[in-house]
Image (cartoon, rainbow, N blue to C red):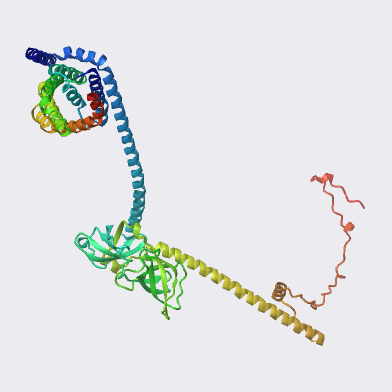
Amino acid sequence: VASAARLGNKVDAGLLVGCVVLSLVAVALRDQDREPIAAALRRTVVAPLVGLQRGAERWRSAWVSSAQRQLVTDSLALRAVKAQALSAENDQLRKLLGLGSRLQSGFVPAEALHSTSSSEELVTTLTLTAGSTSGIKRYSPVVAPEGVVGTILTADPTMSIAMMYTHPDFRASAMSSDGSAFGIIYPHRAQAGGSDAYMLELHGVPTRSQLKPGTVIYTSGLGTVFPRGITIGSVVQEMKTSEVWTRTYLVRPAVSPSRLGSVLVLIPERVTQGIGNVWGATVNADSATRRIAAAGDSIAKQAAVLEARARLAALDSVKRVTIDSVRRSLGAPTTPLTAADSAAMRAQGVPIPAQSTPAPVVRDTTRVRRVPAAATPVPRRDSTRPDTTRPPRQ
Amino acid sequence: MNWTGAVRTIVVCAILIVLHYTLRPLLAWRASVDFLIVALLLGSVRMRPGSAAVYGFLLGLVSDSLTISGFGAAALGMSLIGFAASWLKAVFFADNLALNGFFLFLAKWAFDVIVLVVGLRTGGAELAMQIFVWSPLSAAVTAVAGVIALSLLKPLMEARST
């Protein structure tokens, strides 16, 4: 048994040595010598494994390409979503550029970062990316192309915090577009998160001034914060309050907080100078509408005056005709109707009575001796030649 | 080992070899699973050391034929690993999955070191990085996968003993 075991060990050792030697020979082979051996193995014994590996790698590449396609699809969808946001932002920036070109100077552009905390349901403040080094001070007006956004609450050197019109402390002196009604703009005290959470209230409008829904409200410039003529919003409806001598209106702001991306801050010098007619397109349109309405009113008034005059003239004519008929019956001389009287009576449908016409002028025609037509014959002109002119028959 | 046991061992080793050429390309991990080492150890502990060396040599040749460089290095490494596994089976390979996992780890790491050094595939810092970072990672992954595979194939292997 021991000898068999020794023999077995020797065989094992021999096999190991043989394998090691063969392996080392394979390692030592040159590339051109080892490649035919490897290729022969790949074509024969290892061929099924090569096929399996190739299939697995195909599956792998298909899965990877599918994942890449999915990534491409996802990125395209993401780009489409971003494109919409970029389009909206582009639109807003274009409007802001237009506002900047109309203002020309005296403003600081800033990017608005919404600083709503999780506990704050209503957006009341904005963080702006411009500060006091740019000329921004406390209470500088913040505007957007659509109108008033708010005022600066704190101005740090490189950034500032703006109080939006939804802030409980926001106030603005306001007026209607025609300047007939003045009041103070307050944030609407509504339940946060409601549909009218971002509305405004126009307080202190005199009772005699009644504003129709849709009337545009502008800053009046009576305060020192906002210059005159910046759009605030439009009247929605009158609110019922306990105040007797003043009216309160619910106003829909022109600026939507959700669309705010970039704003302009008016520096104090610009506020002092005023903004002119920057938001005037709306003012002009409103004034034009009012002028057209006023012109229509004046035409209607003129027509009414003319109608009243015509009616008066007709009455006068009727009265005159009646007097004449009475006079005629009494044998007194009558007053003849004028052309205007006749026209007025015709317009009113009153029958025109028969009038006494003056006696016809008798003309003495005996002094004129009438010559019969045959006595003065006209030569027949058949031709222009004189020799063809026939003498008249006697 | 009777014929039935031999057939079952061959089937299990074949499954592992097929997994090596199907599952590994699908996963394509940087530290990949080496099912050939698992198949080598599983077969070697049931053979004489000389037969295990030849078995390792053949498996190594199969592996070498599908690699670009270092032809023969895998054959040398697997011959030595197979011989050592068969020679040390009575000492180390107890019926303990954790211990089996540990020796799978050692076998894979030793095989990688032999292949990298003999095959002269890399050198310098890259060789050190391969030996001390990627090879241990690959050995750990192989040990885990080998333990899982042995657990799954245990009923088949136990049927051999009954």
**B141 vs B118: above or below:** below
**A361 vs B116: above or below:** below
Tally the numbered discs: 0
Nearest the viewer among A106 and A151 is A151
Q: In this orientation, does residue A156 appear?
A: yes
User: Is A157 positioned to the left or the right of A271 in the image?
Assistant: left
Across and down, in percent, residue A114 comes to: 29, 58
User: Is B48 positioned to the left or the right of A117 in the image?
Assistant: left
Across and down, in percent, residue B33 comes to: 20, 30
Across and down, in percent, residue A111 comes to: 27, 56
Q: In this orientation, does residue B71 appear?
A: no
- The image quadrant where one finds the N terminus of chain A is top left
Nearest the viewer among B13 and B7 is B7
Q: Please identify the quarter of the rendering in which residue A176 is found.
A: bottom left
Q: Please identify the quarter of the rendering in which residue B143 is found.
A: top left
Q: Please identify the quarter of the rendering in which residue A57 is found.
A: top left
Residue drawn at the location 19% of the way across and 25% of the way down: B42
User: Is A61 positioned to the left or the right of A15 in the image?
Assistant: right
Residue drawn at the location 18% of the way across and 30% of the way down: B142
Across and down, in percent, residue B12 comes to: 24, 24
Nearest the viewer among A377 and A326 is A326
**A304 vs B12: above or below:** below
Residue drawn at the location 25% of the way across and 63% of the way down: A161
